[in-house]
Amino acid sequence: MLSFGWYFYYGLTLSKVNPVLFVNRLDFTRNILMLTNLQGMLLKYFWLRVSFDVIYCLLPILLAFAVLKEKYYTKWVVVVTILFNMCYGIFMASFTYISLDLYIAWFYVPFVFYPNTAKGYYFSFHSIRIVFLLIFFTAGIWKIRTGAIFNADQMSGILLLQHKQYLAGNPSNWFSQLVYFLVQHSYYSYVLYLLGTIAELAFIIGFFTKKYDKWLMVAFLLFFIADYFLMRINYSNWMVFAGLLYFSQLKKEKYEI
Amino acid sequence: MFLKEFYTYRPKGAILLVAFIIVFVFLNIKWGAVAFPINVYGMYSGKYPLQDTQWVYKIKTGESFVDFTSLSMAERDKLQYSLDFYGKYKSNNVIVFNTMKRVLSTLIIGKLMEEEKYTPVADSIQYARWFNHLLSDILNKEIHSCEIYTQSYVWQMNQLNPVATPQKKYQFVSEP
């Protein structure tokens, strides 16, 4: 709800953006979904955009209610939430600059609540935990694969691209000065990038043991803070993933009925 | 081991998880089109050379330029990326449509893809009205006309320096 509130406040919901065009991507799922021409209908009808926003906001509440009250229809709410969040994320990413990556947490995490037994819940929880670890670990692998980690100016280049409007518009602004410092002193900015990559690669530990999950959670929170304050990217939608690390230590035996 | 226990408890679930991991790794190795939710989560793993020319937008309303540093990060991004999108959406959507149709043509899905659904075009008056409305919301004042300039900058002598005069790219005029 807090995350949605942030997007709503800054006018980043379908009903507030009121788009007039969209940008497609090389994504099979997106292009198959577009066969329905929902994208055309969302461009045309304001009431449909409002409905999408309302449903997106209400589904997590309905899901929480169904799970806590152990309702018989919880499985269906999970399925609807997953499918709807997929549609919502795909179209938001097509109509705005928001990356589709930011919506994956609300696609994956509802899977955790699909089983209706405690033991099933244990396995679904840890399956999604594995998916989350995979996402972060592959992000680190990508940096090695592309050679980015071997480029001492990598972070400086990223900061320049990300904040060019600030630097060109008002170089004396405090944030511009901070970015300038990091770009000019590439060894400092490179260390940040290197530490981030090491933290991403460290997620491989989670495949073998849950002992260090709280440390992985700290790394994840630092990643969120650094992205928000330095890169000015809001990953608050992903905060729900932190629960997969925080609660992972609960033993399977506790779920035996 | 988790997978072994999972397979004992629910074989289909375990097979689904392993299949997901295999497809995830495959799409990441193959490096091309993706299939949400299986994406390539690179998170700034591309190459970003310091020497790249940076193109900066300057938005002129009346006699003054918009100061991006006075805006929130969301407002800055909305303006910047809206202009980015406007500049490339037509050609991008055509390229993506042709590529996806070709790839999916072996399945019935490709035959069902109609170009007009994937490549609609917003007319310039409609876009101008939309952009001026966005700008009005962000600047908290009525805007019915603005000029968009682009200026190139390069990193030289430890700072970002302009290398050309601003070039007017668009003019958005909408009715009051």
Image (tube, grey):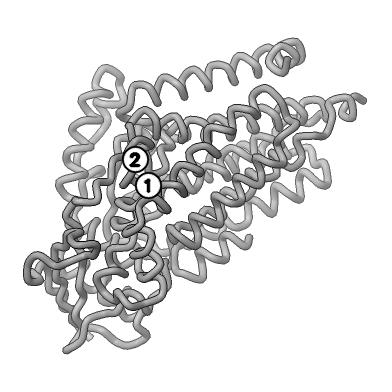
Farthest residue to the right: give it: A257
**Residue pointed to by mark 2:** A34
> Who is closer to the viewer here, A11 or A177?
A177
Alpha-carbon neighbours of circle 1 within 10 Å: few (<14), some, or many (≥20)? some
Q: Is residue B24 visible?
A: yes
Up/down of B74 relative to A155, above or below: below
Q: Position of residue A152 (x, y in %)?
A: 33, 43
Q: Which chain is home to disc 2?
A: A
Q: Position of residue A211 (x, y in %)?
A: 75, 31
Q: Is residue A112 left or right of residue A176?
A: right
Asked if badge 1 and badge 2 are on a common chain, one would say: yes
Q: Secondary structure at mark 1?
A: helix
Alpha-carbon neighbours of circle 2 within 10 Å: few (<14), some, or many (≥20)? many
Quadrant including the C terminus of chain B: bottom left
Q: Is residue B150 left or right of residue B23?
A: left
Q: Is residue A222 left or right of residue A152?
A: right
Total numbered labels placed on residues in the image: 2
Give the quarter of the image for residue B160: bottom left
Q: Which chain is home to disc 1?
A: A
Identified at 30% across, 35% down, the residue is A26
**Residue pointed to by mark 1:** A38
Up/down of A176 relative to A123, above or below: below
Say whether marks 1 and 2 touch (CB < 8 Å): yes
Specify the amino acid type for callout 2. Answer: Met
